[in-house]
Image: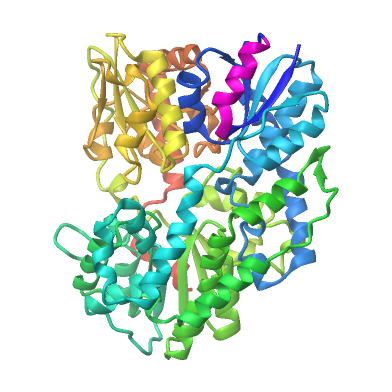
């Protein structure tokens, strides 16, 4: 019996080798849920997938503390602006490192437990090398050349050079191809030229409340007015309290920049576009620094016997371009201060990301008197590791002076995880005011059990969630499946990764607003999304669908008694049937507990909650 090791990019070649050796199973060691779903149906359909999700879930909790402490040790050794700009320092779970460490731990357990005949597919070269060391007798299937996606960074650099040196002609380039358009949208030189052409000007001098935020299609209302999807009604409340308010909007990667820029400029809002405050030489310096970044990571680093050094170095190497973008936040702050922008306070969505760390570092360097306030961006899972500094990082890591939470729930979580209590204030749910405008009755029962599937912003995670729902309910007339994609998820991409079950007559992809859909749903299926709290407020029970591939970040983690969790189609079906059958006193008691939990997590907005940002 044989173990075959293969990179994710070469499964076709690996399948031939597995067939020749009589191998009938495959194991995925990686984090790409969308790829795994597609391969399970297409390239590797002839083999049976070995389940690994329960192992990954267990290790995600067993290794959590050691991982945070290990990053803390690295922070002590590498303390610098370049370090805090890195995803390694930030611990962002969506930047793959921790997912891969947990997948590697799970693979080691299976191999040590006697796994002797399988095709083991790894999502990255470093994972493949680590698994190979764990199974020295395994046979490796080598790749056959460079993949097409490797061309995209080169194309992006070429477009950037064109945008920098031929700004008058660059507006015609988007007609060439989607690849060229993406390259342009990612080019600071192009964005600056575009903003200037649209009439945006650099505004000098400011001393009020400056809000760093992300911009996408949600940032402009149908009537053309600016609206911020991350701060909700906070700008209005600040202005009512006598504060002058301005925004520093960064375009969300993947956004179609030209129409959004046009709408933002026309909105009349006070917007300080970062592209207008940074010189090209500063951006070039950021690229040089990112290219040279080489943090000290001990070669023998491991977490409970799981080797992690190679995976950490791989992350650094693969994210150098992002590292340069994050470093540019320091240049942006320097440019703003040089232009006389010296706000009394700076506010930003708090998720503990690398750009937030650079933002705090830069304001303390360039304008030390500025108050730095992070507004909790609604993350309740303790696997959102970037939210939790290691104890050794306190006093070193550039944290905000204050974190304002959406309610009591996250304050309690932060304090229990060692966050300095004097730096926390309880605020209110400024993005979820509608939940408290009027009490929403539970939806009336229908002939079918209506299962609403609410996806996250991640396409692969969305595919995995929908796939689980289809496996449990597609084609069954006792159920109707309503799929609501996150606004940033492309429906065509998702449908392309799903199988024929997505065309079942009882399955529909919905475009109606989430409150309307919750008004006609019996049960919500979710992964990493705060929609589960909206469901509780509407009296809709929830099922958290666990992953077979990545980390399980459950927003209802603080209230496990209010939801069910399921991994297999059978578990999912049983959970939905149990929840939809609740009635009488049991149902009333659940609804009371659910609404109390929502009030605790997403506190109602009142005129006093702005004090958490100002006091």
- Give percent across and percent down for residue 179: 36, 53
Determine if residue 169 is in view: yes
Q: Is residue 435 above or below residue 172?
A: above
- Give percent across and percent down for residue 374: 50, 64
Q: Is residue 50 magenta?
A: no
Determine if residue 61 is in view: no
| Residue lying furthest left | 223
- Judge by depth and name the residue closer to the eye, 381 or 434: 381
- Judge by depth and name the residue closer to the eye, 422 or 448: 448
| Residue lying furthest right | 300
Residue in the picture at 41% in, 43% down: 457
Residue 258: which quarter of the image? bottom left
Query: Would residue 431 be found to the left or right of residue 269 on screen?
Result: right
- Give percent across and percent down for residue 233: 31, 62
Residue in the picture at 79% in, 18% down: 113
Residue 295: which quarter of the image? bottom right
Q: Which residues are magenta?
A: 9-21
Magenta-colored segment: predominant secondary structure = helix
Residue in the picture at 46% in, 35% down: 461
- Give percent across and percent down for residue 277: 41, 82
Q: Is residue 97 above or below residue 503?
A: below
Query: Would residue 362 be found to the left or right of residue 174 on screen?
Result: right
């Amino acid at each position: 019996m044989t173990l075959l090791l293969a990179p994710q990019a070469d499964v076709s070649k690996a399948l031939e080798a597995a067939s020749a050796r009589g191998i009938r199973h495959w194991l995925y060691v990686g984090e790409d849920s969308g790829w795994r779903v597609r391969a399970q149906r297409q390239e590797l359909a002839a083999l049976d997938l070995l389940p690994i999700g329960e192992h990954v879930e267990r290790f995600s909790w067993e290794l959590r503390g050691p991982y945070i402490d290990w990053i803390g040790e690295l922070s002590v050794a590498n303390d610098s602006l370049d370090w805090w700009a890195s995803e390694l320092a930030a611990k962002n779970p969506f930047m793959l490192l921790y997912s891969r460490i947990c997948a590697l731990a799970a693979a080691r357990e299976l191999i040590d437990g006697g796994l002797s005949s399988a095709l083991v597919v790894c999502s990255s070269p470093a994972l493949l090398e680590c698994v190979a060391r764990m199974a020295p007798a395994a046979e490796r299937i080598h790749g056959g050349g460079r993949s097409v996606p490797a061309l995209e960074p080169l194309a992006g650099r070429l477009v950037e050079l064109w945008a920098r040196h031929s700004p008058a002609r660059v507006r015609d380039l988007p007609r060439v191809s989607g690849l060229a358009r993406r390259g342009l949208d990612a080019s600071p030189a192009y964005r600056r030229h575009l903003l200037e052409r649209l009439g945006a000007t650099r505004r000098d001098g400011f001393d009020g409340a400056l809000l760093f935020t992300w911009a996408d299609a949600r940032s402009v209302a149908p009537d053309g007015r600016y609206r911020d999807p991350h701060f909700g009604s906070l700008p209005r409340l600040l202005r009512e309290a006598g504060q002058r308010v301005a925004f520093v909007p960064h375009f969300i990667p993947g956004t179609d920049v030209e129409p959004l820029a046009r709408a933002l400029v026309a909105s009349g809002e006070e917007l300080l576009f970062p592209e207008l405050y940074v010189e090209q030489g500063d951006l070039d310096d950021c690229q040089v620094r990112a290219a040279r970044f080489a943090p000290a990571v001990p070669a023998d680093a491991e977490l409970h016997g799981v080797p992690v050094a190679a995976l950490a170095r791989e992350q650094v190497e693969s994210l150098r371009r992002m590292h340069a973008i994050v470093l540019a936040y320091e240049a942006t702050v320097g440019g703003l201060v040089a232009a006389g922008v010296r706000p009394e306070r700076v506010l930003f969505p708090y998720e503990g990301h690398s750009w937030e760390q650079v933002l705090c570092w830069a304001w303390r360097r360039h304008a030390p008197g500025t108050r730095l306030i992070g507004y909790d961006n609604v993350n309740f899972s303790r696997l959102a590791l970037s939210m939790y500094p290691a104890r050794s990082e306190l006093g070193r890591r550039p944290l905000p002076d204050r974190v304002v939470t959406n309610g009591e729930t996250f304050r309690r979580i932060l304090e229990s995880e060692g966050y300095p209590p004097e730096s926390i204030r309880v605020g209110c749910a400024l993005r979820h005011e509608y939940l408290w405008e009027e009490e929403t009755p539970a939806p009336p029962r229908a002939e079918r059990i209506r299962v609403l599937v609410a996806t996250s912003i991640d396409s692969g995670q969305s595919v995995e969630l929908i796939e689980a729902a289809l496996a449990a309910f597609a084609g069954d007339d006792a159920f109707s499946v309503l799929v609501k994609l996150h606004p940033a998820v492309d429906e065509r991409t998702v449908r392309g990764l799903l199988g024929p079950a997505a065309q079942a007559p009882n399955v529909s992809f919905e475009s109606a607003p989430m409150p309307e859909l919750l008004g006609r749903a019996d049960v919500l299926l979710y992964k990493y999304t705060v929609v589960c709290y909206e469901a509780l407020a509407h009296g809709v029970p929830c099922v958290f669908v666990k992953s077979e591939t990545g980390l399980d970040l459950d927003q209802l983690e603080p209230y496990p008694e209010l939801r069910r969790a399921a991994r297999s189609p059978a578990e999912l079906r049983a959970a939905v049937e149990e929840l939809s059958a609740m009635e009488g006193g049991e149902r009333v008691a659940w609804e009371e507990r659910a609404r109390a939990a929502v009030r605790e997590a997403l506190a109602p907005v009142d005129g006093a909650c702005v004090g958490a940002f100002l006091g």
